[in-house]
Image (cartoon, coloured by chain):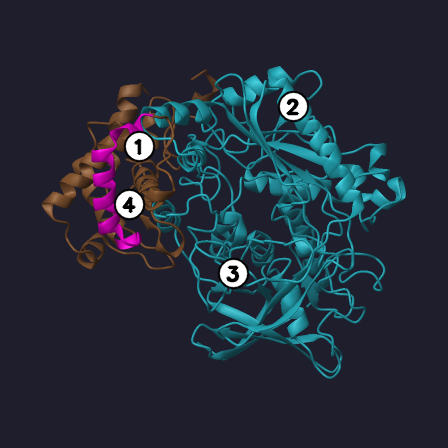
């Protein structure tokens, strides 16, 4: 391997956003080098690892772990890769592997609602985006075509064109819950990149009910497919390449990227343009590590905004047994939701939210629950059937306002390559707590409507994050309050761009990948435009 | 797909393995070599107690052997506790008359083993945390209990939309 590679564009991170951007640039004739810190694994290997895992409820369990490119792990025991410094733990899960974190997801590909982009102007809270929904609409559609997205068209996000995919038929569970909650609650099909027919060489969903942690047949789109496509388009990929420093020249432009291979040999690569796509925690970590005399606080950090405004959806859950068998576990795991609380004047007072209804099999979880309660023999088997047939689990995707104190910094710990690990500070504010109260009231109403017994809420004050990590590389027009401009370019460095969920100034009330991917394609077009004359 | 064929598919596809955790994936021969082969008497005891706990007389003997091996690998004081559990249930069979286990403080260790054995049979995993050992997936009894309606996650349910009808 050369120790001095050159490409038109160097992309750091082979997840869904970096891969989509790299593909577009390569197809336009640019030479692209894509560096990925993790290894490459096949879908077949991952499925086998899932089936042989002792921890199937941990979505990270099928994915390989290496001390050379560590990622947060929580089973069998937490590895404490992420140092928690705030009052609320932020248990981020992300995969450092060719294809990135969307190997494990439910292919939720939602658009924001238009008012999400004007939150501050309309409701006096949070931030406005530097761009509008209309500016992103066509890019939303481009990603929807790539991924084969279908869903309920009347979901609050206007469309110029129909979904490219017909929706996946509703499960029996979804039908019963929809009927029984109407008309007070409108349960709709989620927007998902899941095939209801053969599409782009991939088969229709056949109900493996394992979208998370891995679809065994690629019936849903994911970053592994995007990364393979990048390679097929001519992108040069180097895996097990852990980028540890960005080098700049006298003008402040990024002149090189330094990475370690897994034997800790250092390599230097350079490109006219550099794009960081290493997720909303690892990218700020890299920027903060890249200090110099001229940039003592790190690259792109002149205004001390790198890593700040860490947001996710602070979620609460409820589970209960419905008064009729609905049999979760037939069809996709996350097919439907309630969207009527995503927008409205109430946003001036409390956080908006969406309510997600799970269709994941509950057999394993109720079995563990019953054995813990001491059941045995035929009573155990009767109860497994009873609870597995009736158990319904619900959680919310609630918007968190950007708060500069919620942030990613560097811890004092070092990984096996001697690189700092991330430290996170995360705190849930009063706006979100009022939204949580509103969520909880709706949970109780929903449970009552479904004749619920055995109702279990999240503990008061306990929030889980939804792995929708945003804000740490926020785009904005004002360099004093943002890291990147409206195109994802660093305010401080003309040839440095960032893509991924980190550039999103707010988190909205839906899964964030579609918005991040749409922004990534928009950034790719901007790079092509800016560099077309060489 | 009929209920019968779904059960048959599961039974045919299921194999047994012993897979350690913490990044170490044991091939079956390696795991078997690591565990001392159980004596026939112990195997008989394990199977008899398992039948009492599950109230299932048709437990798979090959799976029983794999679960026993896993127990010896993953559970502390397994041999002693198994012997004590055998004695306890022999002397006080009424302990299993209630729907839930309640052996009392004096026999807490035996009750814990009973739950661990039930976990092995019903979830396919023996032990917990760093000591957890995966044994089987398709053949876990909880998957068998619902096999007329569900397939274990990651296996195909049927053609797209077949889940639309009432189960």
Rendered image quadrant of residue A330: top left
Find residue B135 and name its label: 4
Q: Earlier in the sequence, mark 3 or mark 2?
A: 3
Tags 1 and 4 on a common chain: yes
Foreground: B25 or A520? B25
Q: Main secondary structure of the magenta part?
A: helix
Horizontal relation, residue B40 to residue B121: left or right: left
Q: Measured from the top left, where is residue A8 in percent x and y?
A: 60, 68
- 3D distance between C-alphas at marks 3 and 1: 34 Å
Foreground: A336 or B55? B55
**Chain A shade in the render:** cyan
The crowd level at tag 3 (other Cα within 10 Å; few <14, some 14-19, many 20+) is many
Find residue B27 and name its label: none
Q: Quadrant of the N terminus of chain B?
A: top left
Find residue B141 and name its label: 1
Is A225 situated above or below B95? below
Q: Which residue is mark 3?
A: A71
The crowd level at tag 4 (other Cα within 10 Å; few <14, some 14-19, many 20+) is many
Chain that is coloured brown in the picture: B
Q: Which residue is mark 2?
A: A446
Label 2: which secondary element:
helix
- 3D distance between C-alphas at marks 2 and 1: 32 Å
Which residue corresponds to the image point at 54% horizontal and 74% vertical from the top-left?
A: A259
Foreground: A109 or B76? B76
Q: Is residue A50 magenta?
A: no
């Amino acid at each position: 391997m050369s120790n001095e590679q050159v490409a038109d564009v160097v992309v750091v991170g082979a997840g869904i956003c970096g891969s989509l951007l790299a593909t577009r640039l390569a197809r336009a004739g640019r030479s692209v080098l894509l560096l990925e810190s993790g290894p490459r694994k096949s879908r077949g290997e991952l499925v086998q690892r899932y089936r042989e895992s002792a921890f199937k409820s941990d979505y990270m369990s099928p994915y390989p772990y290496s001390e050379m490119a560590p990622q947060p792990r929580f089973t069998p025991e937490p590895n404490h890769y992420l140092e928690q410094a705030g009052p609320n733990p932020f248990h981020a899960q992300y995969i450092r592997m060719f294809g990135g974190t969307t190997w494990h997801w439910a292919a939720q590909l939602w658009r924001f609602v238009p008012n999400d982009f004007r939150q501050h102007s309309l409701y006096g809270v949070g931030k406005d985006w530097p761009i509008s929904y209309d500016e992103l609409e066509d890019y939303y559609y481009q990603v929807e075509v790539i991924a084969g997205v279908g869903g309920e068209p009347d979901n609050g996000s206007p469309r110029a064109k129909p979904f490219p995919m017909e929706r996946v038929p509703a499960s029996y569970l979804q039908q019963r819950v929809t009927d029984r909650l109407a008309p007070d609650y409108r349960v709709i099909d989620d927007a998902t990149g899941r095939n209801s027919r053969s599409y782009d060489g991939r088969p229709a969903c056949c109900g493996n009910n394992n979208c998370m942690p891995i679809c065994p047949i690629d019936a849903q789109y994911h970053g592994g497919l995007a990364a393979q496509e990048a390679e097929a388009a001519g992108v040069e990929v180097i895996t097990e390449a852990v980028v540890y420093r960005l080098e700049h020249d006298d003008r402040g432009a990024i002149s090189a990227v330094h990475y370690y291979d897994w034997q800790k040999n250092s390599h230097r690569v350079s490109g006219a343009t550099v794009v960081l796509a290493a997720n909303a925690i690892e990218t700020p970590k890299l920027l903060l590590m890249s200090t110099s005399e001229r940039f003592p606080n790190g690259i792109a950090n002149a205004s001390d905004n790198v890593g700040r405004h860490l947001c996710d959806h602070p979620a609460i859950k409820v589970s209960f047994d419905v008064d009729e068998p609905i049999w979760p576990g037939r069809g996709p795991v996350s097919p439907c939701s309630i969207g009527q609380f995503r927008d409205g004047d109430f946003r001036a007072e409390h956080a908006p939210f969406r309510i997600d209804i799970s269709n994941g099999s509950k057999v394993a979880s109720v079995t563990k629950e019953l054995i813990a309660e001491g059941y045995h023999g035929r009573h155990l088997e009767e109860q497994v059937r009873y609870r597995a047939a009736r158990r319904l689990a619900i959680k919310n995707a609630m918007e968190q306002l950007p708060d500069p104190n919620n942030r990613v910094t560097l811890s004092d710990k070092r990984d096996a390559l001697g690189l700092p690990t991330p430290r996170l500070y995360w705190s849930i504010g009063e706006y979100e707590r009022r939204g949580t109260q509103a969520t909880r009231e709706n949970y109780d109403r929903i449970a009552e409507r479904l004749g619920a017994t055995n109702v279990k809420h999240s503990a008061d004050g306990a929030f889980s994050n939804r792995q929708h990590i945003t804000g740490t590389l926020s785009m904005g027009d004002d360099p004093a309050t943002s890291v990147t401009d409206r195109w994802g370019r660093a305010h401080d460095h003309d040839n440095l761009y960032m893509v991924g969920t980190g550039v999103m100034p707010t988190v909205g009330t839906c899964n964030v990948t579609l918005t991040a991917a749409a922004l990534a394609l928009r950034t790719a077009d901007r790079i092509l435009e800016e560099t077309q004359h060489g | 797909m009929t209920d019968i064929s779904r059960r048959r598919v599961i039974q045919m596809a299921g194999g047994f393995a012993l897979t350690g955790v913490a990044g170490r994936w044991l091939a079956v021969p390696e795991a078997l070599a690591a565990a001392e082969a159980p004596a026939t008497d112990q195997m008989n005891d394990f199977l008899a107690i398992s039948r009492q706990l599950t109230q299932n007389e048709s437990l798979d003997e090959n799976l029983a052997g794999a679960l026993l091996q896993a127990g010896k690998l993953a559970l502390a004081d397994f041999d002693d506790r198994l012997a004590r559990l055998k004695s306890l249930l022999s002397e006080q069979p009424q302990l299993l008359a209630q729907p839930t286990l309640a052996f009392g403080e004096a026999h807490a260790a035996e009750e814990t083993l009973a739950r661990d054995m039930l976990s092995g049979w019903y979830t396919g995993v023996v032990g917990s945390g760093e000591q957890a050992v995966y044994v089987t997936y398709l053949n876990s009894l909880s998957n068998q209990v619902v096999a007329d309606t569900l397939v274990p996650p990651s296996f195909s349910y049927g053609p797209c939309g077949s889940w639309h009808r009432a189960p």
